[in-house]
Image (cartoon, grey):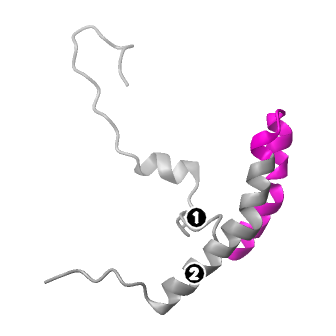
């Protein structure tokens, strides 16, 4: 059984939008930002394309939609057991 890597119509549409964004919006600004010696100014130059990427859904596309606080994450994080070294009370992680 072979795997079909053909894009669905929705994926093809997204591909066209992403390509147009990269060619029309991102590419010209990135060229200018790369030539800018001041890194802070170069960073600020990318603000417009970032806003446009956000509107298109590209900027947040890889983040989960679940809201989590630091507390809930730290409570669910697996904890390491303390080593059982005789006389060692300070040195554990």
Instruction: Please tell me which residue lies in front, 47 or 34.
Output: 34
Q: Circle 1 sits in a helix, a strand or a loop, which is it? A: loop
Magenta stretch: residue 44 in it?
Answer: yes
Q: Circle 2 sits in a helix, a strand or a loop, which is it? A: helix
Q: Position of residue 33 (x, y in %)?
A: 79, 46
Magenta stretch: residue 55 in it?
Answer: yes
Q: In front: mark 1 or mark 2?
A: 2
**Residue 50 visible in the snapshot:** no
Q: Residue placed at 52% from the left, 65% from the top?
A: 64
From which residue to which does the magenta span run? 33-56
Q: Position of residue 92 (x, y in %)?
A: 35, 20
Vertical arrangement, residue 8 with respect to residue 23, above or below: below
Residue 67 found in image quarter: bottom right
Vertical arrangement, residue 89 with respect to residue 59, above or below: above
Q: Which residue is mark 1?
A: 67
Q: Residues within 10 Å of mark 1 (few under 14, many from 20)?
A: few
Q: Which residue is mark 2?
A: 14
Q: Residue placed at 43% from the left, 89% from the top?
A: 8
Q: Position of residue 74 (x, y in %)?
A: 48, 45
Quadrant into which the N terminus falls: bottom left
Q: Main structural element of the magenta stretch: helix, strand or loop?
A: helix
Vertical arrangement, residue 12 with respect to residue 87, above or below: below
- Measure the alpha-carbon separation of dots 1 and 2: 26 Å
Quadrant into which the C terminus falls: top left
Residue 61 found in image quarter: bottom right
Dot 1 or dot 2: first in sequence order is 2
Q: Which mark is residue 56?
A: none
Q: Position of residue 30 (x, y in %)?
A: 74, 52
């Amino acid at each position: 059984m072979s795997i079909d890597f053909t894009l669905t119509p929705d994926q093809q549409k997204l591909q066209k939008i992403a390509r147009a964004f990269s060619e029309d919006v991102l590419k010209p600004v990135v060229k200018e930002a790369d030539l800018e010696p001041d890194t802070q100014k170069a960073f600020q130059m990318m603000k417009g394309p970032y806003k446009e990427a956000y509107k298109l859904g590209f900027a947040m596309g890889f983040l989960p939609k679940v809201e989590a606080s630091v507390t809930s994450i730290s409570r669910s994080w697996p904890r390491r057991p303390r080593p059982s070294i005789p006389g060692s009370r300070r040195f554990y992680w």
